[in-house]
Image (cartoon, grey):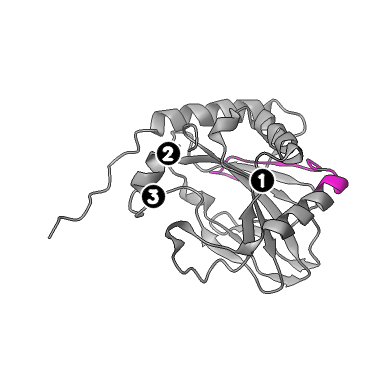
Amino acid sequence: MSAPRRAPDRDPDTPVLKRIGERVRARLEADPAAHRLPVNGLEIFGLSEFFSAAECTRLMGIVDDVAQPSATYGNDEFAGRTSYSGDVDPNDPFILMLQRRIDDLIGLEPSYGETIQGQRYSVGQEFRAHFDYFSPEQAFWESEQQHGGQRSWTAMAYLNAVEEGGSTDFPRLSLSIPPQPGALIVWNNMKPDGTPNPLTLHAGTPVLKGTKYVLTKWYRARPWW
């Protein structure tokens, strides 16, 4: 019987994540369109009308085309994520144009970003509180270290207004962000020292009326895949 795998004491990418945090933070703080949300302990920025109404409409159709029951890492059953989601075509010229816009906003190379994922939430669907970053205790940790390492920043866009519900909540900060068509939210999953920030715990609250469409793009410590 083999001994249990011992989790590393420290992510070797921590210094890299610290530098990425400094770089993106400086870029966003210098951008007049990016507004830092006034919360302590979390670097989170918002940009209104980052996508136009026409772009949002087209993106919602793309999400409908790729949407399947949402999965989680390890293909485990996870009742806390009940939305539909799917990766968009990264070679679609329209997607490439929007992706470059996000890359340019935060100042990271395109190779550091995962494929954009679209999500659709109908009435009652949600994504319960979770972290975007990986933990060394998770079974897929070692595999992810071979494919770009830790997640650094998250960029999430709302594509439509929701009649009721569907906010993105950070329960440890008492922060709730309602859907606003075209708005982009960007946050650092790490603390300024490059270690995971537990205050990034967040949830997509249940949609109570209507449908919610979202796009999410995650960035890594190193080139992804």
As displayed, is residue 15 above or below residue 64? above
- Which one is in front, 116 or 189? 116
Q: Earlier in the sequence, mark 3 or mark 1?
A: 1
Secondary structure under the numbered disc 1 in the rendered image: loop
Q: Which residues are magenta?
A: 39-55
Secondary structure under the numbered disc 3 in the rendered image: loop
Callout 1 crowding tier (Cα within 10 Å): few <14, some 14–19, many ≥20: some
The tag on residue 149 is 2
Which residue lies under the disc numbered 1? Answer: 89
Residue 40 lies in the magenta stretch: yes
Q: Earlier in the sequence, mark 2 or mark 1?
A: 1
Residue 124 lies in the magenta stretch: no
Q: Report how far apart the C-alphas of labels 3 and 2 lie in the structure.
A: 11 Å
Q: Report how far apart the C-alphas of labels 2 and 1 lie in the structure.
A: 23 Å
Amino acid type, label 1: Asp
Inspect this view and state whether residue 111 appears: yes
Viewer-nearest of discs 3 and 1: 1
As displayed, is residue 46 above or below residue 169? above
Q: Report how far apart the C-alphas of labels 3 and 1 lie in the structure.
A: 28 Å
Residue 91 x/y as whole percent = 67, 39
Secondary structure under the numbered disc 2 in the rendered image: loop
Q: Earlier in the sequence, mark 3 or mark 2?
A: 3
Residue 68 x/y as whole percent = 62, 63
Amino acid type, label 2: Gly
